[in-house]
Image (tube, rainbow, N blue to C red):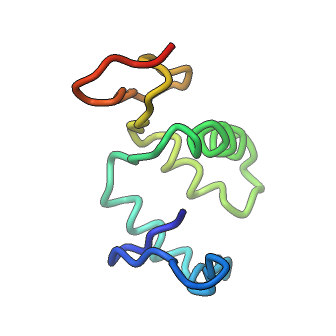
Amino acid sequence: MQTSPDGFVSTGPDDDQAWVTWALEEIKSHVLELFDTSDTILIGRKLAVDYIPFWEDTVTQPEHEMFEMAKRIVAAKKIVFTRKSDHSVWPNTAVVCNPGKSCVH
């Protein structure tokens, strides 16, 4: 699921996400500005397992078109919400496990 900055979540037929863009050059400066004003990324575990390793790999590739974003994402503190584990396998990442209950192991 993706949510726009103003809270829009796609709920149309077939999970239409036409509002999501990959026109990187058109939005890059705005996205970088958003990252520059944020220090923490909130993410669910199911997305984190692909998201965090992708950006950790991308930051090792200075020629990658998303390198500038990768630097900011890797540097940001990440908080992963989960019910499955109470520890993180990724650097700069904390886990919040089912607040008020114990994690499922």
For the point 37% across and 73% down, the residue is 5
For the point 52% across and 37% down, the residue is 45
10 with respect to 98 (left or right): right
Where residue 50 appears, as percent x and y from the top left, is 67, 42
Looking at the picture, tell me which residue is in the foreground, 15 or 26. 15
Where residue 79 appears, as percent x and y from the top left, is 38, 37
Q: How many numbered marks are there?
A: 0
For the point 39% across and 47% down, the residue is 42
Query: Where 38 falls versus 59 (above or below)?
Result: below
Looking at the picture, tell me which residue is in the foreground, 55 or 14. 14
Query: Where 84 falls versus 1 (above or below)?
Result: above
Query: Where 38 falls versus 55 (above or below)?
Result: below
Residue 6 quadrant:
bottom left
Where residue 63 appears, as percent x and y from the top left, is 77, 55
Looking at the picture, tell me which residue is in the foreground, 80 or 85. 85
Where residue 40 appears, as percent x and y from the top left, is 34, 45
For the point 37% across and 59% down, the residue is 36
